[in-house]
Amino acid sequence: MTSSKRLLSAVLSAFILAVPVSRSLAETTPAAPAPAPVAAPAALPTSGITAEFKVIFEQITTKLKAGQGSEAELAPDVAAIDALLAKHASEKTDEVAMIALMKARLYLEVFENTDKGIALLKDIKVNFPNSEISKNIDQAVAGIEKQAAAASLLAVGKTFPAFTEKDLNDKPLALADFKGKAVLLNFWATWCAPCVKEMPSIDRLQAAMGKDKFLVLPLSLDGPSRPKVVPFYKDKDLANLGIYFDRSKKVMQGLGISILPTSILVDPAGNELGRLEGEADWEKPEAIALMKAAIGSAG
């Protein structure tokens, strides 16, 4: 299980279609679906910084789809962004600030260079003090630093942080209660389409592995909402999974998780074996093999 790099396609597309930035950069934790988005313009501009950036965006997207996401492989594209920013340096507009934001997110989400990404975010506040984006920079940086601090505590082989929660009936749940079993923590929500898609395969995985030495703990981000989660379980016939909630997202945020679904595998000794961000097919042979290896370590 490896951490997937976060593609910028959706964010970059939103910029190209002139969808306004309406939330803090720090709000990377998935939330319930927003109202229908503002309709995109009938046609993209054929001139100006938006049109110029579109060319760079398409080049980056092509490379990412081809698996070329290293800093070296995207160096020409970063240079093109720098040239574009230099060309429009005198324009202190939200549009230009957005280009600078895209560069910062490239470092944060594709190159996974937190220090450089934070530095670029701070530069936006200095260079575009009156932009809408600058209003959220401090909150964004604080959130990213908090996630980085949490991530530093987590690594394959390290003892997984203890946490407590409650099940559907408010019965206390602690990870320590399952020491001696391999545990797959799954953070999900009923409003998350990829989560909904993978839940049946997780349910079947639990059935196939049994509960003697392996347990799936689905932590719902819906909040303790019986009207949503209980009917969902019934509709999907998830008979092998328990119902648990991450109240106020405290566990998710404490672990630095920003993508749904995210699954974390913990071995019987309480050490992290790995995590997977994004939808997975838990019935694939490699997934089954990993779960069996985790169970085998239970003795």
Image: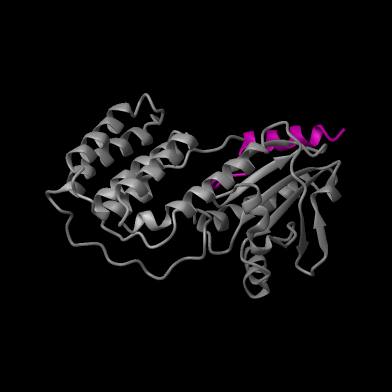
- The correct choice, above or below, for 167 with respect to 280 in the image is below
User: Residue 13: x, y in percent?
Assistant: 31, 51
Q: Can you say which quadrant of the picture contains the C terminus?
A: top right
User: Residue 147: x, y in percent?
Assistant: 58, 46
Q: Nearer the viewer, residue 135 or 193?
A: 135
Q: Relative to residue 248, is residue 67 drawn left or right? A: left
Q: Residue at x 62, y 61 (%)?
A: 221
| Residue extent of the magenta highlight | 278-299
User: Residue 105: x, y in percent?
Assistant: 40, 43
Q: Is residue 229 visible?
A: yes
Residue 255 lies in the magenta-colored region: no
Residue 288 lies in the magenta-colored region: yes
Q: Relative to residue 87, is residue 94 drawn left or right? A: right
User: Residue 278: x, y in percent?
Assistant: 54, 46
Q: Nearer the viewer, residue 183 or 29?
A: 29
- The correct choice, above or below, for 142 with respect to 193 in the image is above
Residue 182: name its quadrant: top right
- The correct choice, above or below, for 209 with respect to 64 in the image is below
Q: Is residue 112 visible?
A: no
Could you tell me how many numbered marks the image carries?
0
Q: Residue furthest top?
A: 72
- The correct choice, above or below, for 151 with respect to 45 in the image is above
Q: Relative to residue 205, is residue 128 drawn left or right? A: left
Q: Residue at x 66, y 57 (%)?
A: 250
Q: Nearer the viewer, residue 34 or 116?
A: 116
Q: Residue at x 33, y 48 (%)?
A: 12
